[in-house]
Image: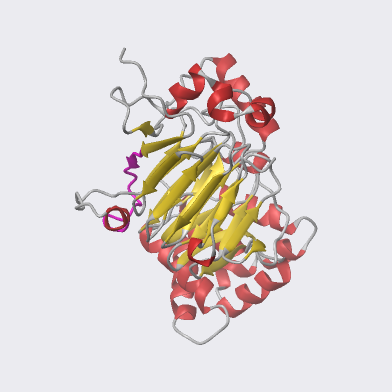
Amino acid sequence: MTSAPRSPRLIALDNAIREYAWGSTEAIPELLGIAPTGRPAAELWMGAHPDEPSRWSEHPDRPGLDELIGRSPQRWLGEASLAAFGPRLPFLMKVLAADRALSLQAHPSRAQAEAGFAAEEASGVPRGTAGRNYCDANHKPELAYALTQFDAFCGFRPVPATLELLDCLGVPELAGYLPMLAGEDGLRATFTTLLSLTGAARDRLVEATVAGCRRLAGNDSRWAGAARASALAAADFPGDIGAVLALLLNYVRLAPGEAIYLGAGNVHAYLRGTCIEILANSDNVLRCGLTPKRIDIPELLRVADFTSVADPRWQPSRPGEGHLVFEVPVPDFRLSVLDPAAGQVRLPPDGPHLVLSGDGEASLACGPERRTVPRWHSVYVAPGEPACAVSGTGQVFVASTNL
């Protein structure tokens, strides 16, 4: 094997595009300045996930970031990250571009993932097969930061507001569920009952509800946006109960620069738009609608969090001019959004960091090392002294641990 060029702090990354059916054919190619292929370019992955690791672009052997970390974890992760998470990069960053609804889904807690993964390993269900729920033993909290207008369902709406929405919708087939929703543990009971419907009863309910959503979407009600979102999901997946279930969830339209955080058990689905997504390094997903993929209703209900959320938007702290930090209630990651034009920013030396340049060009300086990062390209910053200085002409996104 060719010996590695000496570069102890900064390495430029080549990142893979994942082609999922819901992805936009144009948004990510446009950001990268490459020609669209006509296939859905759904996610640009940046990190060390074993399914699609970023690669050291200037190394003659182009090793994956996961391979580098595996060979020398302390060098690439640093003592703090290695002690907290072991020899793996704890976060994954993506550019996600949706042109169709994603699955209505939830992610397990770490304890749930560990138990589910161990049970499936013991039962002999092969990884990557249709009968498998858990790809790994990690949790998958995530934060989505909107680059464009971004539409999503996120967490359960408080029951009084949902009762108002359903009353405004005026669908007789839904009327029988209102007492259940208003009763004890009403969100869990109603969601479970709707999800368990089958056959003609399910078909009639979906048809009537979608028709009601289309009517409501055309007026000036405060609920027109939520109705329009459910109708849009129904158009993507005709006959799917997910369009009805979505009426129990918050509908959120994010402006560029706004974010939502999705903790363990949060039932959600992205609808349209482009975002930066940062998450724990996992691919565990439990689905319950708006998908042709595996649905496991009992397991989804086991991990789902039925706590209502009045507003799922996640607010940043503002440590300095042009420097926003989205801190989350898990140690695996945080997202910093920098405006270097407002002043140079120094990254904490304990690292590691993954730096993505936005619409402008970013410059990194770590002591004698210098690197220019073209728009929508990324660099991995290994921990060490001196602190790495970031300057440039446009937004810069930095993924870090949240220790």
Quarter of the rendering containing residue 68: top left
Which image quarter holds the N terminus? top left
Residue 255: x and y in percent read 50, 70
Residue 168: x and y in percent read 59, 80
Residue at point 28%, 50% (across, down): 40
Q: Is residue 317 magenta?
A: no
The single residue placed furthest to the right in the displayed view is: 184
**Main secondary structure of the magenta stretch:** loop
Q: Is residue 19 above or below residue 117?
A: below
Residue at point 44%, 83% (across, down): 218
State the residue in front, 270 or 247.
270
State the residue in front, 29 or 185.
29
**Which of the colour schemes (rainbow, by chain, secondary structure, one colour) is used?**
secondary structure
Residue at point 73%, 55% (across, down): 307
Would residue 109 be found to the left or right of residue 18 on screen?
A: right
Which image quarter holds the C terminus? top right
Q: Is residue 22 magenta?
A: yes
Does residue 105 show up?
no
The single residue placed furthest to the bottom in the displayed view is: 220
Does residue 319 show up?
yes
Q: Bounds of the magenta span?
A: 14-27
Residue 385: x and y in percent read 59, 36
State the residue in front, 320 or 170.
320
